[in-house]
Image: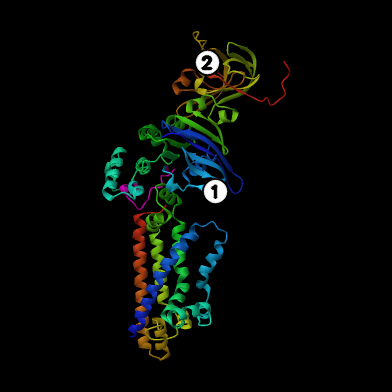
Amino acid sequence: MDWQAIRLSVELAAATTAVLLALGLPLAYWLARTRWRGRAIVEAIVALPIVLPPTVLGFYVLVALGPASPVGAAWERLFGQGLVFTFEGLLVASVLYSLPFAVQPFAAAFATLDRRLEEAAWCLGAGRLATFFKVCLPLAWPGVLTGIVLSFAHTLGEFGVVLMIGGNIPGETRTISIAIYDEVQALDYAAAGRTSAILLVFSFAVLLATYALQRRFVQAWPVR
Amino acid sequence: MAGSLKADFTRRFAGGPVVAAALDLPLDPPRVTVLFGPSGCGKTTVLRCLAGLERPDEGEIHFGDERWFDAATRLLLPPQRRGVGFVFQDYALFPHLDVAGNVGFGLGRMPAAARRERVAAMLDRLDLGGLAGRRPRELSGGQQQRVALARALVREPRLLLLDEPLAALDAALRESLRDELRQLLLQAGIPALVVTHDRNEALVLGDDMVLMNEGRVLQSGPVLEVFNRPADAEAARIVGVETRQPGRVVALHDGVAEVEVGTARIMAVAPPGIPRDVLVCLRGEDVILQREPGPASSVRNRLAARVVGVQPAVPLTRIELDAGFPLFAWVTRPGCEELGLAPGEQVSALFKASAVHLLPHEAAHASPQR
């Protein structure tokens, strides 16, 4: 069993989810509230990773982060090594790849919030940020939880993007799905089966826990 | 608090509707002003602009010597800094917080102990003491209303804005809570502006009234003044004056006008400078119906009338009459039975000269020269 690959995958998924939480919550809130006409463009860009083959996304990220690109070159000057074929590069690609899985549930949750609750908070002296943390986030919690779980699980199982950006460096970019692929290539079906079973059971357990929790939350305070 | 709330602004909506408000509410002594008008006339928009929740397109809002909004300098004071208490139509209580959490929400910067004390005192004051740990969905409509009020009052706002505070309640509760709300507003001692489209609510709740229709302010003044002396035909219709008929002043002596309405002649107290063509306004509750020619009274007008229609309503029955012109009267149900009111019956309609309100009226047709 390739425990190193499993650990790396979990680390990548956790880091990706954390970044998506920080980026995705403000983006989703903005999408749910803006009356700007160009909103559809942003929504379409956010949703692109759902329909694009991971290899296409991986290819563009590879080009954008490679040593020839401004981003890759700047990163190399700052940290002494390139972005591609590293954990950090993988993280950037994973964030893009899982963006819709975080932003869409977040935005859906914010969109159903009664706007007057926010206005009530403003009239009670709460600023925009305080209102977000004291009213919006607690009420949108089921949707936020869904987004967290989906982006975590989605990152855990990614394959094509990793292959394009990360390659197959043990301990650095060799994730669980790559490990399974290698095991199958080596005709080691027993090992591939074990690793796959772990991923399957883990994913199912996480989703089950989420939906069970969500049901309890939703019953606790129905959002009108 | 010295000064007044002065607002004169315009808010345009995409697709046509325009709301233009001109208000001047004195703040000291605190009074309850109702913003009254039919649904969709822009009352809520005015309230939201005053709270800072909506940005007017033009104009100014001043509160005492503070400037809240000025289109010319693009100044818009955010709601957080206006010190206004807002009670939403469906109360907008935070569903994830209990009653104490809701009421204490606006006291965020206060030390926890002082905050608890303030919240507890406010809950006691509004008779919510035992409900501190309840969630909003576990409360009745009336309790929710009081929590919303407590949440606004606990911050000691300088102005209270209430958007249809009774509309979310069922009819039976609404009536009993009307008086209670009036008492609470008086006790609070804070100038309040209450939006309503219900005449009874306006009468019970308000000291003053601002009358609106189709995005404009038609008239403002003490509630009874606006109700009994509407400034024009439109205002008369909106405050619910049932009888509004064009007439012509044929004689004028000692401040009493003799007015020809339809085929009848009535006496009316004449405001100074009344023109010849007038609109005769008369409220149904100011008309008495009698079967026999009764004893002589001080009532100046006694008209023979034929019952045209009988429409039972709550709490009174509406009688439509032909007294030489269409005339409406409200009678109690026993009164209706005793008089045997039915279409075709003949009765006498009595009303005082002072109950008739005469408005200048542009005659639709060219009247012959006198």
Q: Decide if residue A38 is in sight here.
A: yes
Query: What secondary structure is found at the residue carrying circle 2?
Result: loop
**Left or right: B106, with B38 as reference point:** left
Query: What secondary structure is found at the residue carrying circle 1?
Result: loop
**In this figure, which residue is indicated by the disc labeled 1?**
B74
- Quadrant of the image occupied by residue A44: bottom right
Q: In the image, which residues are magenta? A: B86-102
User: Mark 1: which amino acid?
Assistant: Arg
Q: Check if mark 1's residue and mark 2's residue have beta carbons within 8 Å.
A: no
User: Mark 2: which amino acid?
Assistant: Lys
**In this figure, which residue is indicated by the disc labeled 2?**
B352
Q: Main secondary structure of the magenta part?
A: loop
Q: Decide if residue A197 is in sight here.
A: no
Instruction: Please tell me how crowded label 1 is: few (under 14), some (14-19), or many (20+) other residues with Cα within 10 Å.
Output: few
| A42 or A81: nearer the viewer | A81
Q: Measured from the top left, where is residue A200 in percent x and y?
A: 37, 77
- Residue lying furthest bottom: A186
